Structures are given as structure tokens and as C-alpha cells.
Image (spheres, rainbow, N blue to C red):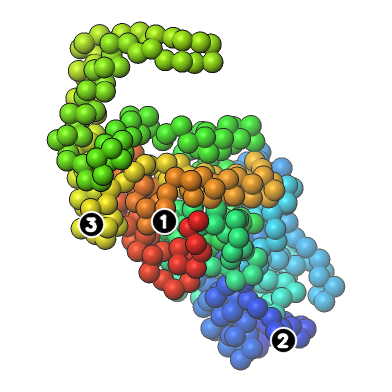
Amino acid sequence: MSVGSSSAGSPTDTSGGGWTAPSEVEQALFEARGRDDWGGYLGVLARQRVYFEVRRERVDAEPSGTSPVFGHDPRTGGLIWAVYTEGMLPPPEPHRVFDWNRLGWFAKVWAAGDPPYVVVNPGSPCEAFLPSAPPHSAAWARYSEEAGFPEYRSGLRTLRVGGPLEGPVAHGLACGALLFVRSGLPWNAMAYHGRGYPTERKTLKDWWGVGSAAEWQVQQRALLALDGANPVWEFALQVRRTIARDFGGHVETGYWRDAAARVLRRRAEGETVITADGVTTTPTVPEAETEARVKGVQHLIGRITRYEARFRADGLLAENRFVGSVDAWDIGRASGMARWGLGARYCDLRQAEAAVVEAGLAAARSYRSWQDFSAGYILGRCLHFDDEEFGDWYTSALETHRILMSEKESPWRTLPFR
């Protein structure tokens, strides 16, 4: 059966007059369908993640298993396997979750008794019915083999419908754009399914140790507390901020190193501080430990200055500018954590939105512009992961920064920072 006749199509008219496609993917599907170009339709679909509903209780019990949920369509009079492109996914619900796979996978796993049709974006103007039984499925499955695995690369993707484009939620989402643009995911997908429910859960557990709603809440609060991604980093940067404020701008690296050493040695002698419990004197620190701290901070200052020099050379920092804080490293990840928690169903949409808005407010308090925010985020990322190798941890972030600062539809160009 040839693709483009009865092997791909829709039994009803969904012409979609006046319809706005959520993204360029659905627009391309809609246009191909409108001209009966089923080869073009399948070619677009084969390059996307194709999402399908799975049974949450079964996935929780066996994450590596596949437990699809089939639906019923009165137009076929029987079961269908509903699948979705990213922009057409339903809003996240507690007990309704989705996974994804490549297009050809659906043909390979089909078994006798499964629905006779895979229905793409059911009920929408870009809908298509694909016969799921062999030999018909082989016609559309070939497109998946030719397209290869749909790995997403850095690129700006925006939901035209279904994602905020302005306002506090959009601003908070833009604070996480370095993470999501790098992964090729829509920057403004507040109703987030990401890389599918099982993968979102596994990633949170592997990278963050988060395996429950309570643990997600603890991690989200920690990122938004802005106690410093690393207290030593913030100490060093605070010393420089103080010098710059007192002396009107530029700070020599040598003076910065000496000033940090003086502060550390003075603190080591014990300080009198006022706390909620009254006046307290901090304990003295042994000289050997103090000198080790001095050496560590001075080494850190050297790392920071070398990163900033590279940032200026690459256009990430303006000439004579420096990074005032790495709070952005936590703020950006807090925006991401809100969506990851929603994708893993450790929070609901209301909680995720509130956390995203809070991240945006924190960014506006700590920085003056998207460029300053980006430099703070990338310095934190590099201090945490890169170890002055200027490898992928740096270059991938730089590439994403350039996309966000240059492309016309980037939120960093369409949304005011404050």
C-alpha cells in the first residue's frame, strides 16, 4: 500500500481554517497534509519525538517496561493508538503521563490485537491515521529508519500556542532558557513533559537524588534560597564587589587576592557578631587551616579571572565588565527544576508556575540584564564542571548564549529583563 493514499490520512476533514499551529513541527505537518504530501508528512514526523500515553502505576513499578494506553475513536469504531508531537501534548495531569519513541518503533512493537491505527495528533488539523499492522506499517516505518535517531541539538524553539510569551511566567521560564535551548526543547513549555515521564524521573534521581515530591520540594527551595551555589565562590566575588563599590570600578587581581587573604585571616582571629541569640564571638581558626583557606581562595580568584578573560574574548562579557555573582547558576536551575518536577509529577502546574515566577523575581534582584545573568550562570556552570578545560561544559553554554542573544524571537530579545 503506497504512502499518501489509504496508508496515511484522515477519515474526516480537519482543514483548520484560522488554526495557529503550536510550533513549526505541527505547522509543517499541517502544510504537508493539506497538499496530500504524505511522504513529507512522515519525513517531518520521523525527525521528532513521538509521545504516547503510558500507565503510570506500571511505569512506576517497572520503569523500563512499556505500558501504552489505547483509546477509542468513533470514526474507526474501535481502538486507536493516539500519539502526539510535542506541541500537541495535553496539559500535565497527576495520573496521566507520557513517554516517547521514534516513529518506526511503533511499527516494530505492534502485536496482533493492538489497535489497527496509530493516530497522530487526533482531532487536530494536522491529524493523520497510520495503519499499524504489517505490511502497511512498513511503508511509513521506513521514514524513521532514514531519519535516524531524533537527537535534538541546541536551537531556539518556541511554542506559539500553549506556552506564555510575555509576563512573569514567561520571564521566569526565560531564566531557564540556557538549559532548554541547549537541549532543543521549547523554552516556554510551562506544561512540561520533556523527555517523557520515565526519563524525567530517572534524570532527577541520577543527577539530583530526587525521588519523591518531598525531595523535590527540598531541592526547589534550596535553589531558590540563593544561599550561594558555593559559599567560597560567593565569598570571593563579594570581596571584589566590595572593593569595586568602594573604589569606583576596576579591581586589580593582585589587590583582590590580598584583600581576600586579609579578610580570611581577620576572621580566623574570631569575630564578634550579632545574632538572634545576642552577641556572639566566633571561634578562632588554626593558622595552618587559615593559610590553606587563603591558598584555596586565591587559586579560585585566578580561575575566575581566567574564565572572565575568555568570556570577554568570546563576547560573553563586555570589556571591563566582571561577574558579580553566580546566583544565576542556582536561579536558572531553579527554573528548570520546576519543570522537571512537573514532568516527573512531583508537583502540579500551579506549584511549578509559582517556582518559575520566583526564579524570575530573584534574577531581577541579582542582575541588570540578560547578558549579566548569562555570564553569572555560565561561570557557575564552569566552576562546577569544567575545571578550566574550556570543553563542552563551556562551549555548549556559549553556543546557547549566542543563540539567545542573537535570534530575533529569543525571549532574551523580546522580554525585558526587569
Q: Earlier in the sequence, mark 2 or mark 1?
A: 2
Disc 2 + disc 1, Cβ < 8 Å: no
Disc 1 + disc 3, Cβ < 8 Å: no
- SS type, badge 2: loop
Q: Residue furthest left?
A: 254
- Residue type highlighted by circle 2: Gly
In which quarter of the view is residue 90 placed?
Answer: bottom right
- Residue type highlighted by circle 1: Ser
Badge 2 density bin: few <14, some 14–19, many ≥20, Cα 10 Å: few
- Residue type highlighted by circle 3: Glu
Q: CA distance from mark 2 to mark 1?
A: 41 Å
Q: Quadrant of the N terminus?
A: bottom right
Residue 313 in view: yes
In front: mark 2 or mark 1? 1
Q: Which of the labelled discs sits on residue 319, or is there none?
A: 3
Q: CA distance from mark 3 to mark 2?
A: 51 Å
Disc 3 + disc 2, Cβ < 8 Å: no
Q: Which of the labelled discs sits on residue 17, or is there none?
A: 2
- Above or below, 319 relative to 82: above
Q: CA distance from mark 1 to mark 3?
A: 15 Å
- Please provide percent x and percent y for residue 298: 20, 30
Badge 3 density bin: few <14, some 14–19, many ≥20, Cα 10 Å: few
Q: Earlier in the sequence, mark 3 or mark 2?
A: 2
- Above or below, 89 relative to 303: below
In which quarter of the view is residue 214 placed?
Answer: top right
In which quarter of the view is residue 303 placed?
Answer: top left
Q: Residue at point 31% right, 8% down?
A: 284
Q: Earlier in the sequence, mark 1 or mark 3?
A: 3
Q: Which of the labelled discs sits on residue 369, or is there none?
A: 1
- SS type, badge 3: loop
Q: Residue furthest bottom?
A: 35
Left or right? Give the position of 348 relative to 286. Answer: right
